[in-house]
Image (spheres, helix red, strand yellow):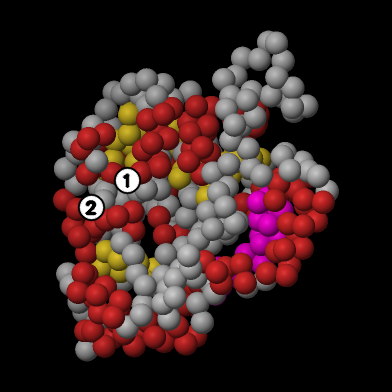
Amino acid sequence: MPSSLPVPFFDWKGLYAERAETFGRIMHETALGGGFILHDAVRDFEAKLADFVGVKHAIGLSDCTNAMLLGLRASDIASGDEVILPGHAFIAAAQAVHFAGGTPVPVELCEDDWLMDPDAVRAAITPRTRAIMPVQVNGRVCAMDEIAGIADEHGLLLVEDSAQALGATLDGRGAGTFGAWGVFSFYPSKTLGCFGDAGALVTDDDGVAETVRAMRNHGADKAKVISADCATWGTNARIDNIHAAILAYKLGYYLETIARRRAIARLYHEAFADIDALDLPPSPDADPRRFDIFQNYEICCDQRDDLRAHLAERGIGTIIQWGGKGLHEFRNLGFDQNLPRTDRFFRRSMLLPMNHVLTESQQMQVIDAVRGFFL
């Protein structure tokens, strides 16, 4: 059920209510057309997404986890292949590597923006390393110029988990376009979200695109036929037409959504910059090389739990991303890395409300409550 808090962490009901009449019409028209699976709405969305990202191919998929899994399989990740990724990541990235047959190797974060540390990547390379998979957390692109240089130097595959970063750029280049392929999530709370699960893989590689398209539909060819000489082990990872139709429409005003989030992030930064006890993400205007989309607004402080309780008492919802666990902490899954910077980060981090349907009144409630705790 939707939260009844004055400032819920995420307003699930408001996400639909924002343009309910239009959303309802789109779903109704799509259903009336009878094209539910891999029909015109999917092709239309894929074309619009590829154009937005600036790539040759966008393949709509059931979710971002399967997008990573199929991308890794299409890249021939095999048993024993190590894939380096940040410990500051959702477990889906590691799960995709595992189920593709590889071994996920989590590494440390940078303390300035909490993203993958290029020096840690270099230190983690072994003779078994096959790929590097940066995770573009919170709508900010990692130091991809440095990471791409490391990949090139060592002859490693570079791929991206850009689930949270559609539209984010570094030096004008978009998240998801730095490596062989990138993936995006369209989970409802994402900056571009549908009303269920969906994802996509984007690439300029014709071979990867063809293989992933076949894999998502049980190995079928473009005519949706599984021929007797099929050589691709496929699965069911198709995006639904109704989700694709909604996403195609929302992509039309997506830049407005990003602008709204950046404005809220700017307001937060200006309000909290004088609080020495708070560590803030870089402000929207901090680095002219970067364009961050603020999927989340994550802060750190030593009094994290007390601050969360203070905000909860005032009706403000917060969460600790991914349950406050780095990938390396899942010891029962075989991880044994020691990542003290990542550990410290997760002891101190929390997310404040951040979405484009947040009202000005709600923003001020968050600001007043946070400042009231420290000052």
Report whether 233 appears left or right of 129: right
What SS does tag 2 mark? helix
> Residue 222: which quarter of the image?
top right
Q: Could you tell me residue 114's position as x and y percent?
A: 31, 58
Above or below residue 138? Residue 118 is above
Q: Magenta: predominant secondary structure element?
A: helix
The reply to whether residue 274 is in sight is no
Above or below residue 275? Residue 56 is above
Q: Which of 145 and 56 is in front in this view?
A: 56
The residue at which mark 2 appears reads as 342
Mark toward the start of the polypeptide (2 vs 1)? 1
Q: Could you tell me residue 300's position as x and y percent?
A: 25, 68
x 74%, y 27%: residue: 224
Q: Does the magenta stretch include residue 259?
A: yes
Q: Could you tell me residue 52's position as x and y percent?
A: 65, 55
The amino acid on which the numbered mark 1 sits, given as a three-letter code, is Pro
Report whether 350 appears left or right of 193: left
Q: Are marks 2 and 1 in contact (CB under 8 Å)?
A: yes
Please state the extent of the stretch shown in magenta in the rendering.
243-260
